[in-house]
Amino acid sequence: MAAKKIDGKTVAAELRAKVAAAAQQWTQRHGKAPGLAVVLVGNDPASEVYVRNKVRQSEECGISSYEYKRDASCSEQELLALIASLNANDAVHGILVQLPLPKHINTAVILESILPEKDVDGFHPVNVGRLSSGMEGLVPCTPYGAMALIQSVHPKLDGLNAVVVGRSNIVGKPMAQLLLARNCTVTIAHSRTRDLPEVVRQADILVAAVGQSEFIRGDWIKPGACVIDVGINRVSAADGSTRLLGDVAFDEASNVAGAITPVPGGVGPMTIACLLRNTLVAATQSRGETLPAI
Ligand code: GUN
């Protein structure tokens, strides 16, 4: 039987609607909208698209966005000075520096310069530590969104085997922490993992964040598994057209899995919705208030 397709577009739209309602209430209480600063260095085409979408969707949700574009030649010192000014700016509740940064800039130094309470990406070591300690904090957007999709299928995850393929700071590691916090038995697999297909076959919950199109094949999937595909790979066809493919061979996997996210339309739309949620969380906490559950 074909797997249930997990509709990220719908789940993301529901989350954005809740964020918009809460943002409107926040604005009524404080006379000014929550604010998100988005910093883009250089002209990577994919990053430009992501940033444009982040700015547009913020505005649609009633969150003011402030965009800062800098040339690829921008120095680390200049970027640190910009972040210091955003840290000090009361109209800015969330700061996002789009990654990757040019090679001459030390990403860790930049991420650590963002105030943890404005770190809506959840990449600051304080927020990383909070997540791994099971404390409240700002959680990275893509794993948070992936988790929401998993829970739309499996409200209770206790004791399930979860395999995360990929160990990045942006997705793999925080994803594993979130699954562990939900009482899954978690394996992080990566490029050096021995007999990867056999490891993947143990997964009741599989999260693929490898960055290689259709890397995970259908016969690696445990029958009935929930498959979350974080990959967004732009692939050129012979006729010059391009299309987006995930890290999982979708058609093959659909014949085996119980539920699966498509690419596009799965995890992708959740990332920005979760960024907007995090901005609202940051704005709410900046006033010592508690966010209604969204
Ligand atoms: N580049 C790719 N994904 C992300 C993300 O979630 N946040 C930031 N800041 N940059 C990214």
Image (spheres, rainbow, N blue to C red):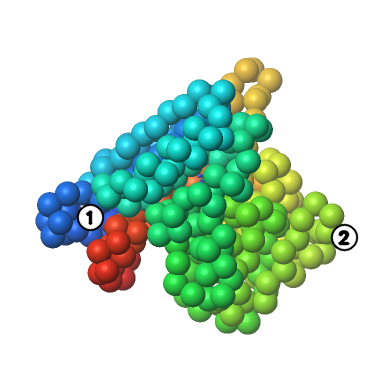
Q: Quadrant of residue 132?
A: bottom right
Mark 1 vs 2: CB contact within 8 A? no
Left or right: 288, with 82 as reference point = left
Vertical side of 45 occupied by 84: above or below:
below
Vertical side of 185 occupied by 50: above or below:
above
Kind of residue at badge 1: Ala
| Residue furthest right as drawn | 194
- Residue 147: horizontal and vertical position, in percent? 51, 64
- Residue 39: horizontal and vertical position, in percent? 44, 37
Under circle 2, the secondary element is loop
Task: Give the class, few, some or many, for how many residues have Cα within 10 Å of label 2's Cα (few <14, many ≥20).
Answer: few
- Does the rendering let one see residue 227? no
Q: CA distance from mark 1 to mark 2?
A: 47 Å
Vertical side of 9 occupied by 284: above or below:
below
- Does the rendering let one see residue 185? yes
**Is 283 or 110 nearer to us in this picture?**
110
- Residue 199: horizontal and vertical position, in percent? 79, 65
Q: Residue at (68%, 40%) from the top-left corner?
A: 213
* Residue marked by disc 1: 23
Vertical side of 172 occupied by 76: above or below:
above
**Is 26 or 126 nearer to us in this picture?**
126
* Residue marked by disc 2: 194
Under circle 1, the secondary element is helix
- Observer-side mark, 1 or 2, equals 1
Kind of residue at badge 2: Arg
Task: Give the class, few, some or many, for how many residues have Cα within 10 Å of label 1's Cα (few <14, many ≥20).
Answer: many
For the C terminus, the quadrant is bottom left
For the N terminus, the quadrant is bottom right
**Is 233 or 178 nearer to us in this picture?**
178
Q: Residue at (83%, 59%) from the top-left corner?
A: 193
Does label 1 or label 2 sit earlier along the sequence?
1
Q: Quadrant of residue 285?
A: bottom left
